[in-house]
Image: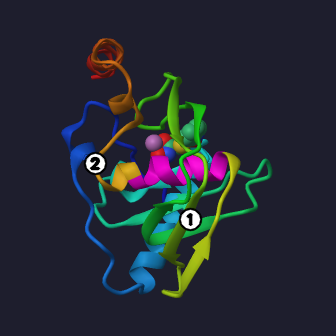
Amino acid sequence: MAILTILEFPDPRLRTVAKPVQVVDGSIRRLIKDMFETMYDAPGVGLAATQVNIHQRIVVIDVSDDQNQPLVFINPEIAVLDDTLRDHDEGCLSVPGFYEQVERPEHVRVKALNEHGEAFELEPDGLTAVCIQHELDHLNGKLFVDYLSSIKRQRIRRKLEKIHKQAL
Ligand code: GNR
Ligand code: NI
């Protein structure tokens, strides 16, 4: 197992659009294990492969308090079920230290493959529904800061760039 390095905004690699997984094999399952270890260590409730600079369509999520409800989504697809929107405070391991309200559909259906390559469907609610949408955005090169005003986004970018310079 290994803890992987998480890319941070404004790293341009976070803008990469990930490619579908063609075959769910042992190397994919090893990557998923490392993604869970990285997510739990951070700690976070979700992680997209994009964040660890692997540009394949893989997401892991665990919103439980005891880190015992792992969910794996390979090649996830989301359908919005109705017009209901909900504001939620979002953070991101790739935008450390910043939390802002983002409005997203509340009711979605997710289709994906699990770590055995089997198709499944889920109608998540609450934080899981927010998180899967946040993670699918990562696979498409999108970050939650993209939903904020450009003023707020620039402020966050400057602060993180300053921190990254000091860390050199
Ligand atoms: O750990 C995380 N918490 C979180 C809180 C509200 C909305 C979304 C998230 S996802 C985030 C981990 C992360 O960056 N996943 O990409
Ligand atoms: Ni994130």
Would you say residue 1 is visible in this rendering? no
Report helix, strand or loop for mark 2. loop
The quarter of the image that holds ligand 2 is top left
- In front: mark 1 or mark 2? 1
Left or right of 160? Residue 38 is: right
Dot 2 surroundings within 10 Å: few (below 14), some, or many (20 or more)? Answer: some
Left or right of 100? Residue 158 is: left
Residue at (40, 44) in percent of width and height? 6
Q: Is residue 13 above or below residue 49?
A: above
Q: Nearer the viewer, residue 86 or 59?
A: 86
Label 1 is placed on what type of residue? Arg
| Magenta stretch, overall SS | helix
Label 2 is placed on what type of residue? Gly
Residue at (75, 52) in percent of width and height? 64
User: What number is the disc on residue 62?
Assistant: none
Question: What percent of the width, then of the height, locates residue 159?
Answer: 34, 13
Question: What percent of the width, then of the height, locates residue 7?
Answer: 34, 41
- Disc 2 target residue: 141
Q: Is residue 10 above or below residue 22?
A: above
Magenta stretch in the rendered image: 127-136
Q: Nearer the viewer, residue 83 or 77?
A: 83
Question: What percent of the width, then of the height, locates residue 62?
Answer: 65, 56
- Disc 1 target residue: 109
